């Protein structure tokens, strides 16, 4: 099956390179090249082949990833996923042009301002809903630092599937817990209720001092991805999200 073809100016506008008029000017100026040859007609139709970003350049820079983008971001502390809160946003960690993409990049779920770690973003609505759907059972693992030493009964309490959080009328699904030292543990959830980890440990009489997500499904946050940096996922990386739990 041949790749879908679109007008070049529409594609570049949707990727945030500017208005169609601005992109047409780039073409006339010789700034757009396909396979090394100037592409002066920005109204030309071009096939959306997977290798297009390696073949098409704008101002001698490779084309940005095509629609269907999924990336993992190492979210630092103090940055918010919500447009409604004050302060720096995670979108400010992305290239400025990417903030004008259409369809826009959206977070796959959220991490609160004081939680760090693996955050997924995509412009693919179908993929987003596949990941967050309860039917997918995509697990998420968090590294937890607690204010007070663990008593020893927390693992059984979380695994029972009977814990009720304040203000809710149905129990949590079972949560897997791995003990670390006296004030550290890892928990793996298959649901994502509001501030769930913090509220779970509050219900157990403790307080979460630090929270870091290091795995979503079978996708681990790479040790060599610094806080504030991101990496585009290839097909294997996306598949890994659904491969673990």
Image (cartoon, rainbow, N blue to C red):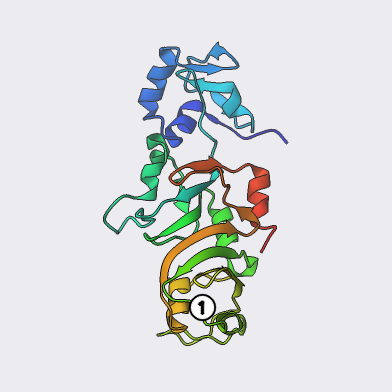
**Count of all numbered marks drawn on residues in the image:** 1
The quadrant where residue 25 appears: top left
Which element is circle 1 on? loop
Residue 203 in view of the camera: yes
Residue matched to label 1: 150
Q: Which part of the image, by quadrant, shows the C terminus?
A: bottom right
Is 188 on the left or on the right of 105, as rendered?
A: right
Residue furthest right in the image: 1
Residue 140 lies, with reference to residue 61, above or below; the image says below
- Expressed as whole percent of the image width and height from the top left, the position of residue 169 reads 47, 87
- Expressed as whole percent of the image width and height from the top left, the position of residue 166 reads 41, 85
Could you tell me which residue is drawn at 36 percent across and 57 percent down? Answer: 82
Q: In this orientation, which residue lies closer to the viewer: 214 or 134? A: 214
- Expressed as whole percent of the image width and height from the top left, the position of residue 67 reads 54, 40
Residue 210 lies, with reference to residue 204, above or below; the image says above
Q: Which part of the image, by quadrant, shows the N terminus?
A: top right
Q: In this orientation, which residue lies closer to the viewer: 126 or 164? A: 164
Q: In this orientation, which residue lies closer to the viewer: 56 or 8? A: 56
The quadrant where residue 135 appears: bottom right
Could you tell me which residue is drawn at 57 percent across and 68 percent down? Answer: 180
């Amino acid at each position: 099956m041949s790749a879908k073809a679109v007008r070049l100016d529409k594609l570049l506008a949707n990727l945030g390179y500017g208005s169609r008029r601005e992109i047409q000017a780039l073409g006339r100026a010789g700034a757009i090249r396909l396979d090394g040859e100037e592409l002066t007609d920005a109204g030309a139709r071009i096939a959306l082949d997977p290798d297009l970003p390696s073949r098409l350049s704008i101002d001698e820079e490779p084309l940005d990833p095509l629609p269907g983008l999924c990336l993992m971001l190492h979210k630092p502390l103090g940055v918010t996923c919500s447009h409604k809160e004050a302060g720096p946003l995670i979108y400010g960690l992305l290239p400025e042009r990417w903030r004008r993409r259409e369809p826009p990049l959206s977070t796959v779920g959220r991490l609160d301002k004081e939680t760090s770690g693996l955050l997924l973003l995509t412009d693919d609505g179908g993929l987003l809903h596949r990941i967050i759907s309860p039917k997918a059972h995509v697990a998420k693992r968090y590294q937890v630092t607690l204010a007070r030493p663990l008593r020893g009964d927390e693992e059984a309490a979380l695994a029972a599937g009977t814990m009720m959080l304040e203000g809710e009328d149905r129990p949590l699904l079972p949560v897997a817990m791995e003990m670390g030292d006296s004030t550290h543990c890892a928990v793996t959830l298959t649901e994502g209720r509001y501030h769930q980890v913090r509220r779970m440990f509050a219900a157990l009489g403790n307080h979460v001092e630090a929270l870091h997500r290091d795995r979503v499904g079978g996708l681990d946050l790479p040790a060599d991805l610094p806080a504030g940096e991101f990496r585009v996922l290839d097909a294997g990386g996306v598949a890994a999200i659904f491969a673990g739990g």
